[in-house]
Amino acid sequence: MYTTLKEVTLRAEELNYTVGSFNAHNLEMLPDMIRAAKEQGAPIIIQTSIDTAKYIGHENIVAVCKTMATNEMVDVVLHLDHARDFDDIKEAIHKGYTSVMFDGSHLPFKENIMKTRAVVEYAHKYGVSVEGELGTIGGTEEGIHVDENDKVYTDPKDAEEFVKATGVDALAIAIGTNHGQYKSKTEVNLPLLKEINAVVDVPLVIHGGTGVNEMDVHELINNGIRKFNVGTELLVTWTKTAKETFGETKVTKSLRHNIIPCNQAVKEIVKHKIGIFMNKEDRTLQLK
Ligand code: 13P
């Protein structure tokens, strides 16, 4: 089913797992990302930046996600990642995205609340879910850089007030993760996550998932993380594979010979991550 962030995270909450939210960077990799979810019997959130949406065409991404959700019988959410401009959000909603992120984390607290609230009121009229953000996630994404020293961790009291005042469906929190960290691993602040989770009753979101140690995922799930963003690992893998295949190819060879291995490599990562995110071992233990 082509569905919303609210729906898939509600189910994840009931069954104690987290939903993988993967950045698609081109149209080529998209079908295999969704096939990976189908093979794992899991829902998937496909997210794009505004620039990727414009490059591929919003309606084209929507068409692929909707068609595959129906034909392959997979729950697919299409989410706009890190939007700061209301017009970009309106465009995504009207062109068929089912979920949007308003990132007001750079704004003063009250202004973040006010603007996020306005997005929620607008999006909910169309049945679209909204993710807000509080605190700052480090690293670089789509050209915006947050220095290690400028990182601000999410304050639990603020988080409680923010969620009540805005009505967001999910909250992205800053607990030490960084965007684009693929050479090393993040030190996640689990005690802070526990404090936030104790006072906030909406699904929590991890950004910068590439840099999160897979050993930490289980604890993150058990403390309310219901949307888990992974982007850079897919991008790096696709590009590295493309360098190899295109580096060796004859120029007359069909493009698909060079592109299929890139998509396959991405598919394997998505499958592997979803396997961890579904927290199956933990649920089997609970059922015993
Ligand atoms: P990474 O690219 O670091 O995996 O982060 C993805 C993300 O959080 C997108 O918002």
Image (cartoon, rainbow, N blue to C red):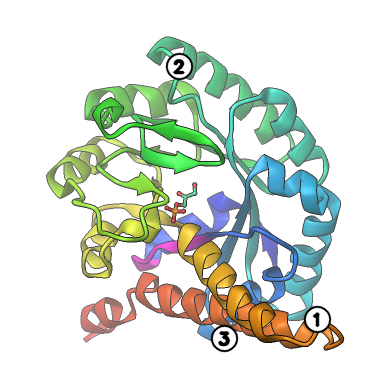
Residue picked out by circle 2: 107
The percent coordinates of residue 162 (x first, y second) are 39, 24
Left or right of 253 in this view: 31: left
Q: Which of the two labelled residues, at mark 3 and mark 1, occupies the earlier sequence position?
A: 3
Of helix, strand and loop, which one carries label 3? helix
The answer to whether residue 101 is above or below residue 104 is below
The answer to whether residue 246 is above or below residue 216 is below
The percent coordinates of residue 5 (x first, y second) are 56, 52
The percent coordinates of residue 191 (x first, y second) are 12, 45
The amino acid marked with disc number 1 is: Leu
Left or right of 32 in this view: 115: left
> Magenta stretch: residue 18 in it?
yes
The amino acid marked with disc number 3 is: Glu
> Magenta stretch: residue 74 in it?
no
Q: Crowding at label 1, few (<14), some or many (≥20) Cα neighbours within 10 Å?
A: few
Q: What stretch is highlighted in magenta?
A: 15-21
Q: Which of the two labelled residues, at mark 2 and mark 1, occupies the earlier sequence position?
A: 2
Res. 180 mark: none
Q: Which of the two labelled residues, at mark 3 and mark 2, occupies the earlier sequence position?
A: 3
Residue picked out by circle 1: 255
Ligand 1 neighbours mark 3 (CB distance < 8 Å): no
Res. 39 mark: 3
For discs 2 and 1, the disc positioned in front in the rendered view: 1
The amino acid marked with disc number 2 is: Leu
In percent of the image, x 37 and y 66: which residue is there? 17
Which image quarter holds the N terminus? Answer: bottom right
Using the numbered discs, state the Cα–Cα distance from disc 3 to disc 2 in whole angstroms: 41 Å
Res. 97 in view: no
Left or right of 82 in this view: 227: left
